[in-house]
Image (cartoon, rainbow, N blue to C red):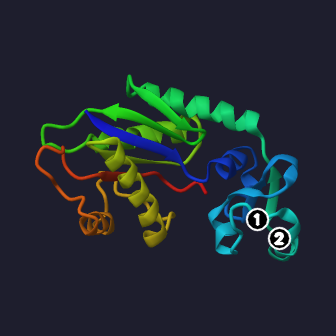
């Protein structure tokens, strides 16, 4: 069996966008308890140099100047969506471990060719998108550590290729992912079940 790490892209922001489509494609930040500081940022807000943990009183002028949309955190909503996306994962795997509010690990079989079941990983991504509406990424690897690396490489290629580029339906890591994996010494290894692979979801912000 291979390991899979599934995480939701910009989970708090993506959750807010589910219930307010006007937030899609515009800079958004979600604030901490008592609206003290930024704890989640859309890619558009990150491009405006809003940093994690920035106090609201320090970024108020930037928020106003660029029309950044601000939302208070809604932990009840986030917990409900966490339960829902993990329920979808459980339809594909009997072993699901919740790592955090936006990330879970599960197991998938290794194919006869020795690589992870990327096709099923894409079905998981598509099922979460249809049933819950959240954008997810999945990294596959023969160990938890390598699946985490594959997931990180999926995030890195989103920045290189752009999240709006439609991913390969095969779900195999792009040449950029394989090149980065090679530089990190994460290529094929005997008995490892193959290199880490990244499956990327479509963009929903």
Q: Is residue 190 above or below residue 41?
A: above
Q: Position of residue 129 (x, y in %)?
A: 53, 42
> In this view of the protein, can residue 171 be seen by the observer?
no
Q: Position of residue 159 (x, y in %)?
A: 48, 68
**Quadrant of the image for the N terminus?**
top left
As rendered, which of 80 and 143 lies closer to the eye? 143
> In this view of the protein, can residue 143 be seen by the observer?
yes
**Quadrant of the image for the C terminus?**
bottom right
As rendered, which of 183 and 79 lies closer to the eye? 183
Residue drawn at the location 20% of the way across and 45% of the way down: 115
Q: Residues within 10 Å of mark 1 (few under 14, many from 20)?
A: some
Q: Is residue 184 left or right of residue 149?
A: left
Q: Secondary structure at mark 1?
A: loop
Q: Is residue 185 above or below residue 119?
A: below
Residue drawn at the location 84% of the way across and 77% of the way down: 65
Tag 1 residue: 54
Q: Secondary structure at mark 2?
A: helix
Q: Position of residue 44 (x, y in %)?
A: 66, 68
CA separation in Å, label 2 and label 1: 7 Å
Question: Is the C-beta separation of discs 2 and 1 under 8 Å?
Answer: yes
Q: Which mark is residue 59?
A: 2
In the picture, residue 25 is in which quadrant?
A: bottom right
Q: Is residue 174 above or below residue 6?
A: below
**Label located before the other in sequence (2 or 1):** 1
As rendered, which of 162 and 45 lies closer to the eye? 45
Between circles 2 and 1, the one closer to the viewer is 1
Q: Position of residue 104 (x, y in %)?
A: 48, 37
Q: Residues within 10 Å of mark 2 (few under 14, many from 20)?
A: some
Q: Is residue 9 left or right of residue 72?
A: left
Q: Is residue 61 left or right of residue 142?
A: right
Residue drawn at the location 47% of the way across and 36% of the way down: 127
Residue drawn at the location 18% of the way across and 45% of the way down: 192
């Amino acid at each position: 069996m291979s390991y899979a790490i599934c995480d939701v892209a910009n989970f708090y922001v993506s959750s807010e966008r589910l219930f307010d489509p006007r937030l899609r494609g515009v800079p958004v930040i979600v604030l901490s308890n008592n609206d003290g500081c930024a704890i989640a940022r859309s890619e558009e807000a990150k491009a405006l140099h809003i940093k994690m943990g920035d106090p609201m009183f320090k970024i108020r002028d930037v928020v106003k100047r660029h029309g950044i949309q601000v939302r208070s955190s809604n932990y009840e909503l986030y917990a409900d969506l966490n339960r829902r996306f993990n329920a979808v994962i459980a339809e594909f795997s009997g072993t699901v471990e919740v790592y955090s509010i936006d990330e879970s690990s599960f197991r998938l079989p290794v194919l006869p060719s020795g690589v992870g079941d990327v096709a099923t990983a894409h079905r998981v991504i598509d099922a979460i998108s249809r049933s819950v509406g959240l954008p997810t990424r999945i990294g596959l690897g023969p160990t938890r550590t390598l699946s985490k690396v594959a997931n990180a490489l999926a995030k890195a290629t989103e920045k290189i290729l752009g999240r709006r580029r439609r991913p390969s339906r095969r779900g195999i890591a792009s040449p950029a992912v394989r090149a980065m994996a090679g530089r990190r010494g994460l290529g094929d290894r005997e008995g490892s079940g193959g290199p880490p692979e990244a499956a990327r979801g479509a963009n929903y912000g």
